[in-house]
Image (cartoon, grey):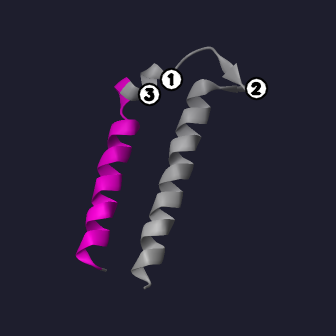
């Protein structure tokens, strides 16, 4: 794996650590519902989905 791809994955890991940290999660811990789901569920699964997509893009460039 190229060095820059490793660096991108490390940066992604640090960003995910910050986004899943308690103070940030508490910002979305509200009673409001969107599409019948609590806001915190939408936030957690949205961030998780985006991290999977970004990781996939990074690994696809690794194949080149």
- Give the distance between the C-alpha atoms of the residues marked 1 and 2, in whole angstroms: 15 Å
> Going by the image, does 60 lie left or right of 7?
right
Q: What range of the chain is rendered magenta?
A: 2-23
Secondary structure mainly formed by the magenta segment: helix
> Going by the image, does 36 lie left or right of 53?
right
Residue 25 numbered tag? 3
- Give the distance between the C-alpha atoms of the residues marked 3 and 1, in whole angstroms: 6 Å
Please say whether residue 48 is one of the residues in the magenta stretch. no
- Give the distance between the C-alpha atoms of the residues marked 2 and 3, in whole angstroms: 19 Å
Q: Which residue is mark 1?
A: 28
Q: Residues within 10 Å of mark 1 (few under 14, many from 20)?
A: some
Residue 24: quadrant of the picture: top left
Question: Mark 1 or mark 2, which has the lower sequence index?
Answer: 1
Q: Secondary structure at mark 2?
A: loop
Q: Secondary structure at mark 3?
A: helix
Residue pictured at 62% horizontal, 14% vertical = 31
Q: Is residue 21 above or below residue 48?
A: above
Whether tag 3 and tag 1 are in contact, CB under 8 A, the answer is yes
Residue pictured at 52% horizontal, 48% vertical = 48
Q: Position of residue 13 (x, y in %)?
A: 33, 53
Q: Which residue is mark 2?
A: 36
């Amino acid at each position: 794996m190229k060095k820059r791809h490793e660096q991108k994955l490390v940066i992604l890991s640090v960003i995910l650590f910050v986004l899943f940290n308690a103070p940030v999660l508490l910002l979305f811990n509200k009673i409001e519902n969107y599409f019948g789901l609590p806001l915190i569920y939408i936030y957690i699964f949205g961030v998780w989905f985006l991290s999977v997509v970004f990781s996939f893009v990074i690994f696809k460039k690794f194949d080149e």
